[in-house]
Image: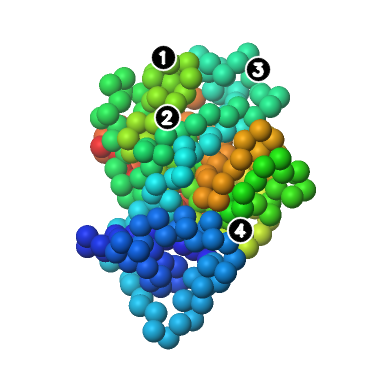
Amino acid sequence: MRIVSFTRGDTPGVGLVDGEEIVLVAQGGDAIGAIGRMIAAGAPERERWVARLAAPDAERVPLATVRLEAPLPEPRQMIVCVGKNYRAHATEFHASGFDSSGKEEVPSNPVVFAKAGSSVVGAGAAIRASLDPTRSVDYEGELAVVIGRRAFQVAPADAMAHVFGYTIVNDVTSRELQSRHSQWLIGKSLDSFGPMGPWIVTADEIDDLGRRELVTRVNDEIRQKARLADLIFDIPTLITTLSATMTLEPGDVIATGTPAGVGIGFKPPRYLQPGDRVAVSIEGLGTLENPVT
């Protein structure tokens, strides 16, 4: 399933993408938080949603007529993020002078930080670079994992059973604020600095995840390109590491890290400017595209 949150006119809705249409599951007040509730409810509710695809009375809405929202516009808690999780990016970031995460160029354990849920916006929404007084706004295209079952002290062999699906996140960052405050929360959490979408694709739709390619373009120029198999710490390792001491709940989002090619890696840095457009694509998951203002 491709699960989508949207607004049609002034009315929120959620549904399933079927070709160029959305099969409506809920709208209005019933749509607010419906995706999170469905994930938490488990298999019976998921099956009810799937049944809508074949329901003769299901309302269908053309994709082109709606505004997409983040599939989880109000994450249950902050987004859990992983830093320096591709070797080439770990090297470029360590050499940038902005790395306050430690002395290791390539980490021996996952570098974990948080991004405020209030930063989340959907595909097509503006990245408000003007909010950053330092004018050092950077892009970070990433695969994001959506947790489907409560996970605590999960073994690596069991970790993937706790994955509901996948989406795309652009971990937009103010580099100067990230450096100035040492801890990364402020530099990562400006309003609109968490584009997510365009939808969630359930795990059963994605086979051989590692061979999928992530590509980030700025104004049609390819800046980042890597296979998901290049992650230093794979998804089972991340879930095991996080759940060793904290409980992951259904609907929690883990952003798995960004590959080389971010703006800070260029000399001089190539930061985002008003008028730019950033598009992050992952095979099988679609494209998350946002303008910069």
In the rendered image, which quarter contains the C terminus?
top left
Indicate the quadrant where residue 8 lies: bottom left
Which sits in the foreground, 44 or 55? Answer: 44
How far is the residue under mark 2 from the one under mark 4? 27 Å
Which of marks 1 and 3 precedes in the sequence? 3
Indicate the quadrant where residue 227 lies: top right
- Please give the name of the residue rendered at 42% of the width and 60% of the height, measured from the top-left corner: 34
Which sits in the foreground, 122 or 175? Answer: 122
Residue that mark 2 sits on:
188
Q: Please, what is the three-letter code of the amino acid marked with disc 3?
A: Glu
How far is the residue under mark 2 from the one under mark 3? 21 Å
In the image, is 151 to the left or to the right of 200?
right
- Please give the name of the residue rendered at 46% of the width and 62% of the height, measured from the top-left corner: 3
Q: Please, what is the three-letter code of the amino acid marked with disc 4?
A: Ala
- Please give the name of the residue rendered at 47% of the width and 16% of the height, measured from the top-left corner: 182
How far is the residue under mark 4 from the one under mark 3? 33 Å
Residue that mark 1 sits on:
180
Residue that mark 4 sits on:
203
Which SS class for mark 3? loop
Which SS class for mark 2? helix
Which of marks 3 and 4 precedes in the sequence? 3
In this view, the mark in front (4 or 3): 4
From the viewer's perspective, is residue 253 above or below residue 268? below
Which SS class for mark 4? helix
Residue that mark 3 sits on:
104
- Image location (x, y in percent) of residue 239: 66, 41
From the viewer's perspective, is residue 283 above or below residue 138? below
Mark 2, Cα crowd under 10 Å, few <14 / some 14-19 / many 20+, is many
